[in-house]
Amino acid sequence: MTEETMPMRDDPLPELSASAKKMDMQRLLSAPLPTYESSVPGSWWWTNVAFWLCRRVSAAQFRTTESSSETPLQRDGGGAMCCGWHTNGLMDPLGIFLQHPKEFVVGARHDLVTRPLLSWWTRRLAVQPVVRKAELLRGGCTEAEAAHLNGRSLLALSSGVAHGFGCVLFPEGTSHSDSHMMRFKTGPMRTVLAASALAIARGLPLPVLVPVGLHFRHRERFRTNQYIEFGEPICIQPDDVPAELVEAVKHGDWVEPPSEAVNALRDRLRDRLPHYTPDTSTWTEHRALHVIAHVRANRSNAPLSSWKEEVHAAREVRTGMEGRSNTAPPSPLTGPTMEAAREVATVLEDAGLDGRDLNSAATGLRKARLAAFPGALLKLSLFLALLPLTVTAFGFQIALGRLLGDSTDEGLDARTSYQFLAAFFGSLLVWPVVAAGWVALAVHQSDVIAAQTGWDWLQLFGGQQRDQLWAISGLYLLCFPVFWLCGMSFAWGWDAWVDLRKAWVRRRVQRRTGERLSALLERC
């Protein structure tokens, strides 16, 4: 993709949420800076607690998570600036953090370090606030204030990358809902060039720039599929870093890298990164490519068994399409095959189905697999058995996540971010209270429990008061893994319900539009 293929006009400024419009410069400038002598840039304890919780919540939020890398990912050695397209809010950087072995220095939109609750964590993880062009142009702060804050944050991030940490910055500068990449900003390139200059000045390994593919089947849905794809790194060579930049960063001040070096590195990233995205004119076109990929795989007796396989197969279809032009934004794909696939994709999407629902011959929709019913019923039975605990442990989080996700002014790309945060903070704030309530109820009803079961649980460790306190403490701690099991039972039960519902929908759609689907699939 060349400079001439990029839009000559400026992209419209993104809509700002109410939170993004509030800027407290004094509080932003008080955000703790990362440390580079430790194994993590922020608090070791709170960083590990946060990421342990993130992995638990992510396991419940996504039905499958896969990752791949074109070259082995290294925990040690030079730093890594990871750059991906940005369509799923907080879930984009989180997916990279959880799949890459490095610890990360983090830069984020300014309000993430000033929001209630969230700021408590971001400050302990040494998250560095960044003011975007949209906030500056809309008068959120003065140009001098933005330059000072961003210079401070970018220098901190550059220092972290120079010391071997990872970093995630998105060249589009904002999360969005397009099916292709927006115009590139230069923040990641400026940061990694400054990091390279610092590394040269201090005799450290040079960092790399890593294009990352972030793939979600339906980014806004609970229990969707996630695939994180690390591309071939772009290596920074000593000749790419001007000698005057190396000399300047030795003094510990932020200095803007020369525009020629920044633009050259931006062009290298821009040539590679769209390959790891849908890079289509519309989402319907993107879904049509996946339909064609399933049709071809089924007819070759090699059905696509994972989201990762589906992403790669659809990319092969996209690359091989006639009339494919290397423009930005991409021009619509044309031809009889694409027209038929678009109509099939639309029919499936409107019914809540996709290419996985085609039969093995790709002539229509598949029938329900009776062998899957026992497993689905088992999952639903476990969910129903734990439902009283699930409602008390998760009712508030589920309601809050649904309310915030459906009412946010930040767009569809922020929906799962709010659901994730509700689950994350709900576990920290709600579970201790719920556990105390259940234990208090068990103590109050201990005589009834003993009469019904013939066992007094308060006497588990003996009859002394101290022994009873041990029993109460043990029950309290036991509540937390039980709550986690309740959460997973809800996720598994949801999977079973979705699968059973889709089996019924396939039958109904096949009965209503089977002949039309078969005719369209013949042309795919």
Image: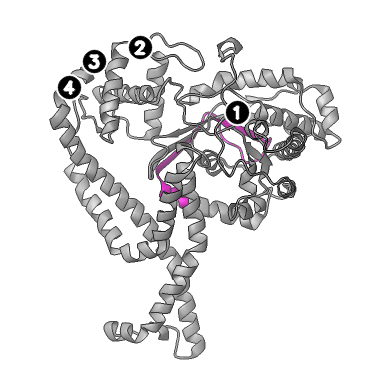
Q: Which residue is mark 4?
A: 516
Residue 314 is left or right of residue 328, and the answer is left
Which of label 3 and label 4 is nearer to you?
4
Under mark 1, the amino acid is: Pro
| Amino acid of disc 3 | Arg
Mark 2 touches mark 1? (CB < 8 Å)? no
Give x and y (percent) for residue 10.
60, 20
Q: Which badge, 3 or 1, comes first in the chain's sequence?
A: 1
Horizontal side, residue 119 vs residue 228: left or right: right
SS type, badge 1: loop
Q: Disc 3 and disc 2: Cα gap in Å?
A: 13 Å
Q: CA distance from mark 4 to mark 1?
A: 43 Å
**Residue at image location 39% in from the left, 57% down from the top:** 487
- Residue beneath the point at 63% across and 44% down: 22
Task: Tell me where residue 301 sits by quadrant.
Answer: top left
Residue 70 is one of the magenta-drawn residues: yes
Pick whichever of labels 2 and 1 is earlier in the sequence: 1
Graded by Cα atoms within 10 Å as few (under 14), some (14 to 19) or many (20 or more), the crowding at tag 4 reads few
Region rendered in magenta: 57-84
Mark 3 and mark 4 residues within 8 Å of each other at the beta carbon: no
Q: Position of residue 509 (x, y in %)?
A: 18, 32
Can you identify the residue that label 3 sits on?
A: 523
- Mark earlier in primary sequence (3, 2): 2
387 relative to 210 in the view: left or right: left
Rendering coords of residue 352 (x, y %): 28, 36
Quadrant showing the N terminus: top right
Which tag is nearer the camera, tag 3 or tag 2?
2
Amino acid type at mark 4: Arg
Q: Is residue 354 visible?
A: no
Pointer 1: what residue? 171
> Farthest residue toward the front?
139
